[in-house]
Amino acid sequence: MEPVIRAENLWVDFPGKSAVRGVSFDLRRGELLALVGESGSGKSVLCRSLLGLPPKGADVSFDVLERPPASGMSLVMQDALTALDPAMPVGKQIAEANRAGLCTPAEFLARVGIDNAAIRARQYPGEFSGGMRQRAAVAVSLAMRPQVIFADEPTTSLDANMRLKIMELLNGIRRDGTAVLFVTHDLSLVRDFADRVLIMKDGEIIERGTMTEIFSAPREDYTKELLRSASIGDPANHTHGKIHYHDTAIHAHEHTGAHTHRHGESHSESDPPAPLVSVSGLSKSYPLGRGKQAAVFENVHLAVYPGEIVGLCGPSGIGKSTLARCLAGLEKPTAGKRTARENLTIHMIFQDSVSALNPRMTAGQLIAEPLYLRDGKTPRQGVITGLM
């Protein structure tokens, strides 16, 4: 099949370090090629360099590099919040990319599974959930009708059902001849959709082959380790039973009667302590415009107890993050009651780390800031590096 990208001996060097080291491969018309490897292995740097958008300070060199013009390539980024313009309605961003004009922005949003697409097209990225923003970023990329789509972890923030829908959409697009370079950690998606697989480690392609070859007869120890790690998520490998947490450890076995918790409290599991934070009858809705309201969730009852890990699951856009923000006191509910223990401190780890971290501060400064606010003095460097 005709290659749309061909690279031989591609290097991407930074001062004192090579992020991509002598990579050679081709991407064929209508193919879905998976690029798999651990975080920091050079996958995203490789994609950006192929696009002609290498990171600042990078030196790109190669023996051969054949690719479409910039207008024939598009990128679906991992962090959708940084990919979308916060000051422009989502529909306008899709229209800007949609040169052919064969579909409306609302039709593109509907294709990636966003409800009320005509109304949503007039909204801004900040009014979308994290998963909805990711789908909107995919819609912008599809609107360009490119020869090649670089999909850099496009399904990271989506639920299992929506991940499948996005992959089916990309799979359908490539039947029209569009090639997809799919960067991912999700080997289940690779197994279901990829034609060929590249395994990347420390900036090098250490193994390559068809999907069947990689999954049935991997040669490299690193590839075998990746496949073993992926099997942890396979329900066939789960140990089912009661899982609980106490004495700083997780225990996966049946447990009855009283036990001592980390805080020295002794109680039976039928007589739990008072919750740290709880909500009852909680509801939240947002205005959609023109007198319409979008109900995020209704009549939620939830309590979080000391030493407990609570799993909150559901489809993308169902209201998980909004509920968490209501529990933390960062969002005001439309109805219902929130109760929290006196002097309770709550911290959030946000889905979009790029938007949560100040890009003008170093990693050390970011860690030091909350310690300074808490203690009123600059923490010792040893404290910061210890936390890192």
Image (cartoon, rainbow, N blue to C red):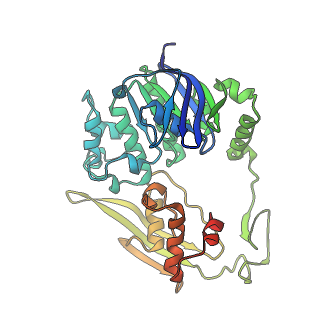
- Depth check: 246 or 282 in front? 246
Q: Is residue 105 left or right of residue 168?
A: left
Query: Looking at the rendering, in which quadrant would you find the C terminus?
Result: bottom right
Coordinates of residue 17 in the picture (x, y in percent): 59, 42
Nearest to the observer: residue 197 or residue 305: 197
- Number of numbered callouts drawn: 0
Instruction: Looking at this view, name the residue that lies furthest to the left.
Output: 290
Q: Residue furthest top?
A: 1
> Is 231 rendered above or below residue 280?
above
Is residue 170 something one can see in this rendering? Answer: yes
Q: Is residue 127 above or below residue 375?
A: above
Instruction: Residue 103: give x, y in percent of width and height.
Output: 27, 31
Point out the residue furthest to the front here: 16
Viewer-proximal residue, 34 or 274?
Answer: 34
Asked which quadrant contains residue 322, the reply is bottom left
Instruction: Tell me, yes or no, if residue 352 can be seen here.
Output: no
In the image, what residue occupies the spot 54% across and 43% down? 15
Residue at position x 47%, y 33% in the image:
49
Q: Is residue 323 left or right of residue 381?
A: left
> In the displayed structure, does residue 202 sit left or right of residue 374?
right
Above/below status of 148 relative to 13: above
Percent x, y for residue 197?
61, 28
Q: Give the side of residue 91 with respect to residue 369, left or right.
A: left
Q: Quadrant of residue 175?
A: top left
Residue 68, image x and y in percent? Answer: 40, 22
Q: Nearer the viewer, residue 67 or 245?
A: 67
